[in-house]
Each structure stands twice: as C-alpha cells, then as structure tokens.
Image (cartoon, helix red, strand yellow):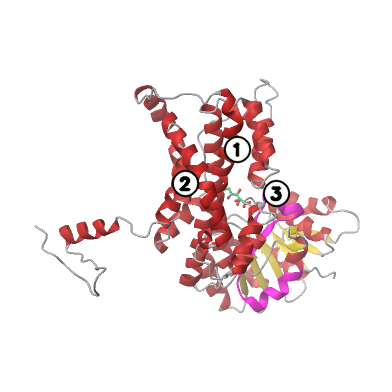
Amino acid sequence: MKQYDFGVVGLGVMGRNLLLNMADHGFAVAGLDLDEQKATSLEKEAAIGQQVVGTTSAEQFASLLKGPRALMLLVPAGKPVDAAIASLLPYLNKGDIIVDAGNTYFSDTDRRVRELADKGIHFFGMGISGGEKGARFGPSMMPGGDKQVYEQLRPIFEAIAAKVDGEPCVAYMGNGSAGNYVKMVHNGIEYGIMQLIAETYDFLKRAGGFDDDQLQKTFEAWNDTELGSFLIEITGEVLKKVDEETGIRLVNLISDRARAKGTGKWTSQNAMDLQVPIPTIDVAVSMRDLSRFKTERIEAAKQLTWEGMKNIPVEEKEQLVEQMKHAYYFAMTATYAQGLAQLAIASTEYGYDLRIEEVVKIWRGGCIIRAVCLEDFRQAYRRNAALPNLFLDKAIGDKLVHDQRAARDIIKSAVDAGIPMPAFMASLAYFDAYRTETLPTNLIQAQRDYFGAHQYERIDREGAFHTQWD
Ligand code: 6PG
C-alpha cells in the first residue's frame, strides 16, 4: 500500500489548503475528515501527478502514513482537538508526532504535551497565520514542542511556508506551548494595529474631511512607504470596494459592532497575569467591546455633545497626511514593542527559551501582521538578543524620538475634535511612561501604606517601611 509523508486531520478550508500546499511541494499527503464529501473530493482538487488521498476512517488514515507518523490537526480549538486526538490514539505508535495548528490556548497545549508524552507521542502546538490564502500559498508558522523532534517536521514546514528574501517564515519557537503563545501575542498585536488603522481612518474622515476616494488613495499610497504592510494594503482594498446593489462603498454599509474570537483578550489577560504592560492591545480589545454597546451609544450621542468639532482646512490636507503617517508609524512601533516585551517576559516565566529575532523574522511574511518595518525590528534583536524593549534599540529609539512630534500633534487635534483615538493615546502614554525616570507611583505606595499598612520602600535606604500617617 502506498505510504504518505504527512497527514492532515480536518479538511475545512484551512486544512484543505495546507494539504494542497504540501502536495504542490511534492509531498504525498493523506487527509482525514468525517465528512465524506470533504474526504472524497480532495483527490479531484489536486493537480495531476500529485499524491493526495482522503479518508473518513481514522484507522485507515493512520495505516496510510509512513512511520514515525507526522500529522497535523486543523480542527476548532478546545474540545474538538481532544476528540480528534482520542479518535486517533488507538492507531498511533510511540514516536509519532501530532501537530495542533489551531488557535489553541497555550495552557491546553502544555496539558496535551504532558498527557501524550506518557504515551510516547510527541505533541506540537503551532500557530499558523495568513488565513485561507496564506494556508494555500505560504503561511507564517510558529511551532513549539520538542526541539529534536522538530527536525522531522522542518523540511515540510519550510517548503510550505511563505518566503521573504529566500528565508522561510517558519522556525522552531521553543518548548511546550511556545508556538501557541507566540501566535496569541501575534493576534494581540493584530488587534492593536487594526484599532490604530480604524482610528486613523476615523480621524482623516471626520477631522480631516477626507472623502472615500481620498481615504482609499491615502492607504494605497502608504503601502509603498515605510508603513507597507498587509493590514495597510487590505485597508486600501477594502475602502475601494463598491456594493453592487447600492453603488455605495461597501465599508459604509457595514455595521460598526465588531466581533472577536478571543485571542486578543487572552493576550491582555495573560499580560495582566505576568504584570507586563500592553496598553495599546488592552484598549484595542476594549474598543471592540465598546463598539457593541450600540443602543447606548446612539442615546449618548444625543446627550453628550461636544461643539468643538472643527474640520481641518482643505489646504492643510497634504501636511495632515504626512503627520498622520509619522504618528501611525510611532504608534504601530509602540504596539509591536509591547507585544515583543510580553514575549520576552513570558519566555522567562514559562521557560520557552524564545529567540525574539526568530519570531520577528518569521512574521515578516505570510502572517496578518507582516510589515516592512519588521526587518528593522529584526535587526534590533540581532544587535542585542536580550533587548528588553524595542524602544531601547538606538536606531528604533531615534526614529520614535523624531516621530513623537507627529503623534502628539495628531492626538491633540483628535482631543480637540472629540474623536476617540485611544490606541494612539495609549501608545504615546506608554512611550512617555517608559521614558519617565520617576513616575508618580511613589504617591500610590504612600496611599497604600496609609490605608492598608502595605509598606513602602525608600530611595535613600534599604528596607520596608510603615508610617503612622494620620
Ligand atoms: C491569522 C488570524 C486568524 C484569525 C483571527 C481573527 O493570524 O491568520 O489572526 O488567526 O483571523 O483569529 O481573530 P478575531 O476573530 O478575534 O478578530
């Protein structure tokens, strides 16, 4: 019987596309799905000469794979992952490898690594980014697990990953749940950047008086500058799209109530647990939540008025675009800085042994937060692998010192106009707080000691102190 190099479990769009991507690169791949139609139609979708087979039987699937088996799960995170593992286990042997490629919460992966290690099965948690297209033509992949075992997966993963300057957008991330953790923070940064773009759009539209065409052209032009990135590029595309029925730009017909699947929230929740400040990401999560209070907002819009709103004069538009561009670069860098600082601390806390330079390297292509600036950020971590914060790199820091003027000016105009730009504000405040040698938290310490005898430390001598304040 023909033996296949790799197995894919779950032949939805993502699983199917990854499988076909593997077949494109010359690998023989078997797919498993309980849905007969999905399993049987696979062979028809593959190109002539490709070695692809689909089945609905876990037993047959396992018998089709070369040993030690390597297979990837593309099923929804949570219980379906446990169910898929349970259905396969009776047919697997010691030394086989299971890769979970869903947006799994990292501690679930740690549990599965432990449970499966007892049975001699290697388990990997791997973040995949890039959506359906990425899966088909080159995603960014963030695998974590046993370093030695990763060598068996490496050839196939490097073949199917996106490439930037010939380098694959996949690398071994670290132990245990490192891959899922990195993907979680990737998504947190994704939330932050999407919120920054939304605020930019709102500001240019309402304070700048930009019409649909001007907005679209601005984003399109920015994509050819240092702001070049997947999210800026698709924003230009989105703003171009006209609704066929009404002839109106589609974006203007879309409800402003945003949804979320939870990975941004996980990033914020875990950052709080680790006591790492990521205010831009936190506020991005909050703004999606706030957007859902539509009825209350409609009422508040009538009551809580602000008459100061004034449009920026037409002749200043060009200057405004330039200012906005620098402000965006500033806030975007601050968002990456927060996420990467969280990764550095999580790496120590959870023993991941992450190399941040590798993380940034594989985010340069394939993934949702891919951006031109990531090459500069990679260089920063190459200069100093132990960099605690991107801000402290001399080249990045100098650029921020220059761009802060624009960020301050845009935020001032937004405050005057009454336009909410909390992600920009949080980014600037993070920068300002980070570069403040003496914060006013001495007062907080004094207050805590006043009402709770929580004690404080002094700057002029060692020890813990309590004062009878009243
Ligand atoms: C990716 C995306 C992907 C997914 C998001 C959407 O990297 O390909 O991040 O994982 O589209 O999870 O997240 P929300 O539904 O929470 O916006």
The answer for how far apart the CA atoms under marks 3 and 2 are is 24 Å
Q: Position of residue 72 (x, y in %)?
A: 68, 64
**Residue identified by numbered label 2:** 285
Magenta extent: 129-155
Query: Do labels 3 and 2 touch, CB within 8 Å?
Result: no
Q: Earlier in the sequence, mark 3 or mark 2?
A: 3
Q: Which mark is residue 132?
A: 3
Q: Nearer the viewer, residue 140 or 56?
A: 140
Q: To which quarter of the image does residue 248 belong?
A: top right
Q: Amino acid at mark 2?
A: Val
* Residue in view at x 80 percent, y 68 percent: 4
Question: In this picture, is 397 found above or below 89?
Answer: above
Q: Position of residue 31 (x, y in %)?
A: 74, 59
Residue depth check, mark 1 versus mark 2: number of the one nearer the observer: 1
Query: Do labels 3 and 1 touch, CB within 8 Å?
Result: no
Q: What crowding class fits label 1: few (fewer than 14 Cα within 10 Å), some (14-19), or many (20 or more)?
A: few
Q: In the structure shown, which secondary structural element does the residue marked by tag 1 occupy?
A: helix
Question: In this picture, is 287 found above or below 418?
Answer: below
Left or right: where 140 falls relative to 278? right
Residue 151 in magenta stretch: yes
Residue 137 in magenta stretch: yes
Which residue is farthest right?
49
Number of dots carrying numbers? 3
Q: Nearer the viewer, residue 189 or 456?
A: 456
Q: Which mark is residue 322?
A: 1
Question: In this picture, is 312 found above or below 47?
Answer: above
Left or right: where 189 falls relative to 41? left
The answer to whether residue 405 shows anywhere in this view is yes
Q: Amino acid at mark 3?
A: Glu
